[in-house]
Amino acid sequence: MPHPLIDQLRFTRHEFKRALRDLSEEDACKRLLPMNSISWNVGHLAWQEQRYFLWYGLGQMPYPEIDNDFAFGCPASTPALEKVLSVWQDIIKISDSWLDHVTVESLQKPLMHNERETNFGNLIWRTLYHYWYHIGENLALRQQLGHSNLPVFVGNLDGHAPYRPEQV
């Protein structure tokens, strides 16, 4: 059984994707300044997952273009949603094989990130919070684009990722 933190990550990814439901390619690529496009945000979260889980965790960088185009501080762009969503899903699929096996000990393993020491547990928390930030941003963009019937609150947490204690 995956670590409870991984359950929360998977639930958060589900909520991120739920906030993209019924989004057209055209609207995903629109920029409402000063914000990035929704499609850029998808690529940006693919970048974070690839960097944190594939690069730091597995030493893999299957999509170097994601690292070049969507890292923090990269210029804004309007990539095709279909393409970045496909890459995001592939990165998740690859990272899940590693995330399925993290333990309390491996989450505490120290590593260097942005010239400071941290651990994988902190990187997962950082990823969770980053997703929620962009879920809110994407829904705000969609409201500004005139979309209706959007998610208004966190989905079925109790059914998909209920609290369970950490097993040591």
Image (cartoon, helix red, strand yellow):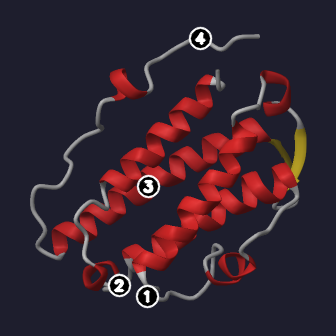
Would you say the residues marked 2 and 4 are in contact, meaning their CB atoms lie under 8 Å apart? no
Give the mark, 4 or 3, whose residue is nearer the N terminus.
Answer: 3
Q: Amino acid at mark 1?
A: Thr
Give the mark, 2 or 1, whose residue is nearer the N terminus.
Answer: 2
Q: Residues within 10 Å of mark 3 (few under 14, many from 20)?
A: few
Judge whether 100 appears above or below 140 on screen: above
Q: Amino acid at mark 3?
A: Tyr
Horizontal side, residue 120 vs residue 86: left or right: right
Q: Residue at x 82, y 44 (%)?
A: 118
Judge whether 164 appears above or below 121 on screen: above
Give the mark, 3 or 1, whose residue is nearer the N terminus.
Answer: 1
Task: Estimate the x, y position of residue 67 in percent, counting from the top left.
Answer: 71, 76
Would you say the residues marked 2 and 1 are in contact, meaning their CB atoms lie under 8 Å apart? yes
Give the SS element for disc 2: loop
Distance from disc 2 to disc 4, alpha carbons, whole Å, reads 41 Å
Distance from disc 2 to disc 1, alpha carbons, whole Å, reads 5 Å
Give the mark, 2 or 3, whose residue is nearer the N terminus.
Answer: 2
Task: Estimate the x, y position of residue 155 in percent, counting from the top left.
Answer: 29, 36
Label 4, on which residue? 165
Badge number at residue 26: none
Badge number at residue 78: 1
Label 3, on which residue? 133
Task: Estimate the x, y position of residue 20 in percent, counting from the top left.
Answer: 31, 62
Give the SS element for disc 1: loop
Q: Quadrant of residue 68?
A: bottom right
Q: Residue at x 70, y 46 (%)?
A: 123
